[in-house]
Amino acid sequence: MVHGSLLARRILMHGAAPAEEVTACHLRPPLDSMGEEEVGMDRRLDSAWWALRLGLGLGPFLAGLDKFFDLLANWEMYLSPLALKVVPVSAATIMRAVGIVEMIVGLAILTRWTRLGAYVAMIWLVAIAANLVTTGMFFDLAVRDLEIAIGCYALARLTEVREAAGAASAARPMTPAARPA
């Protein structure tokens, strides 16, 4: 809210816009016809939400599937020696288990569990980044995974707003003009 007020003052001081137009700078939600805060999501964000949902859902699913075929990479080379010492199974077995988890998370993001799947993917990617750092190599991939984790967080938060907006519009009584005849 502070940024909107500062921007409004700057615009007024420099005469860039009348005071009535400056009120749009505030970050408060608009009020509906009854004077209550409107809970909604700007429909212009739909394309960003869908891009995040598809990318962050298909990516883990396909990477998980590839853990069984090694077409994209030799996944075992990314395992930390520490992980190999702690877990009493072969690297191939670990990577197949990782693949199953990644496919489940990807499907969750692509279906009705988008928010939960995005939060799980975020935590999973942070764990993968930690694993990569403990190899002493692949620091660039660790940074990339942390950035993707931030994208997962953004998807989860956008999904929460979408769900709240959908619940609010479903609970809102229909106006006489909007009722079916």
Image (cartoon, helix red, strand yellow):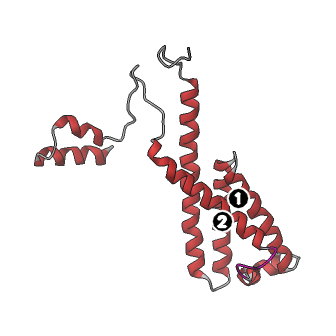
Q: Residue at point 74% right, 64% down? A: 102
Q: What is the three-letter code of the residue carrying label 2? A: Gly
Which image quarter is the C terminus in? top right
Query: Circle 2 — which element?
Result: helix
Contact between labelled residues 1 and 2, with CB atoms less than 8 Å apart: yes
Is residue 28 found left or right of 62 in the rendered image? left
Q: Earlier in the sequence, mark 2 or mark 1?
A: 2
Judged from this view, the residue extending furthest toward the right is: 89
Q: Residue at x 59, y 63 (%)?
A: 149
Q: Is residue 35 above or below residue 68?
A: above
Determine whether 117 is above or below 36 in the image: below
Which residue in the protein does label 1 denote?
A: 106
**What amino acid is found at the position of numbered circle 1 in the picture?**
Gly
Residue 127, percent across and down?
67, 68
Figure disc tally: 2
* Residue 64 on the magenta span: no
Q: Position of residue 33 (x, y in %)?
A: 39, 21
The x and y percentages for residue 42 are 45, 41
Check disc 1: other Cα within 10 Å, few if <14, some if 14-19, many if 20+.
many
Whether residue 134 is situated above or below residue 21 in the rendered picture: below
Within the image, what quadrant is residue 1 found in?
top left
- Between residue 64 and residue 156, name the one nearer to us: 64
Q: Quadrant of residue 79?
A: bottom right
Crowd rating for badge 2 (residues with CA inside 10 Å; few <14, some 14–19, many 20+): some
Residue depicted at 67% across the width and 80% down the height: 134
Numbered label attached to residue 59? 2
- In the image: residue 101, left or right of residue 30: right
Instruction: Give left or right: position of 35 versus 4.
Output: right
Q: CA distance from mark 2 to mark 1?
A: 7 Å
Q: Give, as a single range, the part of the protein colored magenta.
A: 68-73
By secondary structure, the bulk of the magenta-drawn segment is best described as loop
> In the image, residue 98 lies at what x, y percent?
78, 68
